[in-house]
Image (spheres, rainbow, N blue to C red):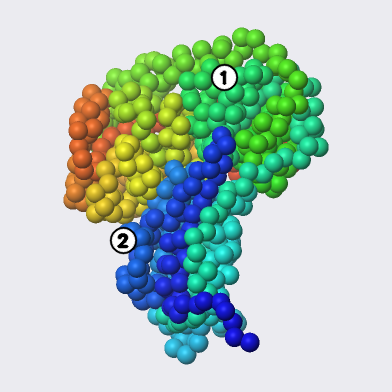
Amino acid sequence: MKSSIKTVRLTVGEAIVRYLDNQYTAIEKDGKLIEAKFTELFYAVFGHGCVLGVGEALSQAQHSIKVMQGKNEQGMAQAAISYAKMNDRMKIIPCMSSIGPGAANMVTAAATATVNNLPLLLFMGDSFATRQPDPVLQQVEQPYNPTITTNDAFKAVTRFFDRVTRPEMIMTSLTNAMRVLTDPANTGAAAIALCQDVQGESFDYPEDFFRKRVHYIRRQKPDEYEVKQLANAVRESKKPLVIVGGGVRYSLAGEEVASFCEKHNIPFAETQAGKSAIKSSHPLNLGGVGVTGNAAANTIAADADLIIGIGTRFSDFTTSSKWLFADAKVAAINASAFHAEKMDGVSMVADAAEGIKALDNYLDGYKSSYTTEIEEAKRLWAKEMERLTSIVYTGDGFIPENKTHMPDSLIAFKDATGGDICQTTALGIIRELIPGNAVVVGASGSLPGCLERMWTTDAVGSYNMEYGYSCMGYEIAGAFGAKLACPDKEVYALVGDGSFNMLHSEMITAVQEGKKINVLLFDNASFGCINNLQMNQGIDALCTESRFRNGDAPIREGEFMNIDYAMCARGYGFVTYTAKTPDELRAALTDSLKQTKPVLIDIKTLPKTMTDGYGSWWNVGCSGVPRTQRAREAFEDKKAHLEQARRY
């Protein structure tokens, strides 16, 4: 019997492009269905393992997808992650690499996406399915298993992995990838390895496979039993605290959570992923919580008798290594059962918006017993913010406002670079002068701590911090991805010199694509955050400061390096500035707003002028055989905190 199914003969590469060009997402919000084209852009670094096949299809086939030229495979994939984040997971940029090192470069980005529950679709060239020419160029061989290639490294860091060895396999592979990419509970990286020979092979594909598909983003409704259990926990509490995580942002539930908290007089704090889901100016918003949290949030958290985490995975930074609210009962609303059931708490598996609506229906006029505590905590933090943003270095090794004696490295840095800007003061200047709706992007070092504590914004979704993986090198690529998603807004990458040197390749792509990004480079000539960790554990600085080698002496004894990062960026086509004083930073920020080309401001920032503490603790590995007095103090401090922390 002859089949009536209509088919079209295409190569695997053509099938991929045609399929991606017809994928859409939709989510319901306030009774309306919001629909978006899932794939408008495609990113590639072409090599012999992908320039043919998929590359040929992107070049020759008819489609509406705009293709961009990546400069580094990790960089382009990090940009794609940021793009997905800024589009609330409703859009993606598929990325493709060649075989071998190109593919391996994307493994880090795959992990970044998966840890942060952000959709990332990766295609990698692979060895030949026929194995006839093995070993092909860039193929890793394992004598015990010829099926293993570089791409097997993706299995540990993706939500979905497949290797396509026959043309018809691409249909089930793409279908499963889309399932993962559009699943709020389990989204992350989806990686499809494409054998080089198979990419160009053809098959009679059903025409229906290439129809317009709308992937509906499910809003999981909670089970009534779980709602009642959580409602009982709330009614029994006197001082609950809500922690707003990334799930609130991606479910577009900021208004629902804010209204719930207002109705029941419940304060809320933010994780890095949850910041900017609700306005900073909201009277119940305490700001960042945990290891990188501020004094207001951590004070209230320490006194709370119930923690309600909404859309958070309760990382060690959020919980202060399970110490901050160790005596409080914990509850969670999360689309993922895995995350909802952490901390041995009361769990509700649900979309953030649906969960909070259902909970509200069972609270029968409940209000917390807070009186003036929230207002007082915020008042004291506002006073501390005034201090942090006005610290001035006077040149004698002291910062007068807090009478803290700074280490010799501060004076040595000032002598080498001429810079005397304190990091917290710089952040205050930046917040004052850049547009209120600007998007800020960050990821690693000491800046995420300062930003979670200090950054305020009433522009919903304008805070783009990658702190699930804290991946050095995300910042500039992420700014480019954010600019692609928000072309009408100023976008700022706040990046340390360590992360800048790790990865800044997509600066060239920003110039090439005509996208103005603003790189604010905090140059303190060190991995300042890790140097702090070293020294706080009683370890002499080693390879965490950018110093010249002085003969055979340890590198910590040399002079600080003074690198002209502005000159580097100018060579790429950026408009550049160097700021060594607060006034020079103000002038640079003001003038940069007049520019249409990408901008870099090289901010010479004094070491050891970041924020720290505020009632938090972080469990780190320290020596059980301490060799110095400071190491002994660190060891005893850890023992004391562990006695008070939750053990699970």
**Residue farthest bottom in this picture:** 132
Splitting the image into 4 quarters, where does residue 318 fall?
top right
Q: Identify whether 38 is placed above or below 15.
A: above
Q: Which mark is residue 284?
A: 1
Q: Identify whether 258 is placed above or below 140.
A: above
Q: Give the Cα separation between the discs numbered 1 and 2.
A: 45 Å
Q: Residue at x 48, y 25 (%)?
A: 279
- Viewer can see residue 18: yes
User: Image check: 488 left or right of 632?
Assistant: left
Q: Which residue is mark 2?
A: 69
Q: Residue at x 28, y 50 (%)?
A: 510
Q: Quadrant of the N terminus?
A: bottom right
Q: Identify whether 102 is placed above or below 481.
A: below
Q: Amino acid at mark 1?
A: Leu
Q: Mark 1, residues whose alpha carbon is within 10 Å: few (<14), some, or many (≥20)?
A: some
User: Image check: 457 left or right of 590?
Assistant: right
| Nearest the eye: 597 or 531 | 597
User: Image check: 79 left or right of 268?
Assistant: left
Percent coordinates x, y for residue 328 in the rendering: 73, 27
Percent coordinates x, y for residue 326 in the rendering: 71, 30
Q: Amino acid at mark 2?
A: Gln
